[in-house]
Image: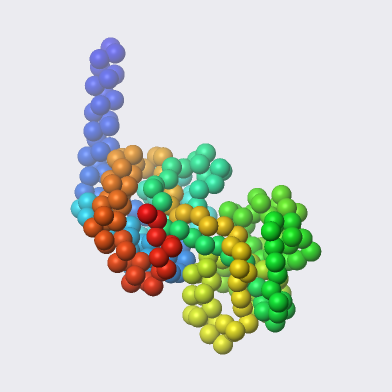
Amino acid sequence: MKTGRWLLAVFMLACVTFCHAGEPVIIVSDDYEPYTSSKNSGSGVILDIVKQVFDESHIETVFKFYPWKRCEANVAKGNAFAAVPYFKTEERLRKYNFSDPIIYSFNRFFYNKEKFPKGVEWNILEDFRGYTMGCILGYWYMPAFERAGLRTEAVDSDLQNMEKLINRRIDFTILDERTGLWMLREHFPNETGKIGMLDKPESFIQFYLLISRTYPNTARITEQFNNGLRMLKQKGGYRKILQHYNMPEHFAVP
């Protein structure tokens, strides 16, 4: 009886692997320039890295774009192998796996220079008490903001926060350095002189694939991605992609 169950388990595992073989790996994301973009069926520095890693392993990928919350739901349900880009948090580690790190992110406080012509010096988050912080619910910084007792106003997108910052409806918002600068150039070219970044970054952390625990053959695909990422770095392809997007050297993960 035990042997029969063991053979059945092996057969079912083989079926799952076989059924997935040859099918494209589904990656979900949202627009987060210059890292991810829905233009041209998926582009941006991170999506280009992910695609090239899988291409070198002869694995086809399909990028699908949804709001961030729906991305996470698709990964949790096993409808997608991974979502990108994501930071590691304690809450996420309880529900998802993560790839090896892909690229660094420098997250900075953006502010209106007309409102704060001398900038603002800060050491701890509590230094921002009394100011209004533009935020997005579910983002990595929310638990820390709550613990620090900061006054926050939530919107649906970073673009909305930047617009509110320009119009002096909030005091600060946190954005990845490259994303914030791209957003100003693309959406508010006449307002770039109004907006600055505080010298001290909020964080200097790494972006990962947020990986499903229920997607077919997920452990094997994760291993192939991590191995492929190391090979891409060794061959120089990783640096070439970063250079194509004018990413500074310190954004590269060794």
Residue pushed farthest bottom?
Answer: 190
Q: Quadrant of residue 116?
A: bottom right
7 shown above or below 231? above
Q: Quadrant of residue 200?
A: bottom right
Q: Nearer the viewer, residue 27 or 120?
A: 120
Find residue 142 and report its horizontal and vertical position in percent. Answer: 64, 54
**Number of numbered discs present?**
0
Residue pushed farthest right?
Answer: 130
169 shown above or below 4? below
Which residue: 29% across, 19% down? 5
- Of the 4 image quadrants, the one containing the C terminus is bottom left
- Of the 4 image quadrants, the one containing the N terminus is top left
Q: Is residue 1 left or right of residue 250?
A: left
Q: Is residue 169 shown to the viewer in this render?
A: yes
Find residue 58 and report its horizontal and vertical position in percent. Answer: 20, 53
Find residue 219 and report its horizontal and vertical position in percent. Answer: 33, 39
Which residue: 41% across, 51% down? 101
Find residue 65 and report its horizontal and vertical position in percent. Answer: 42, 62
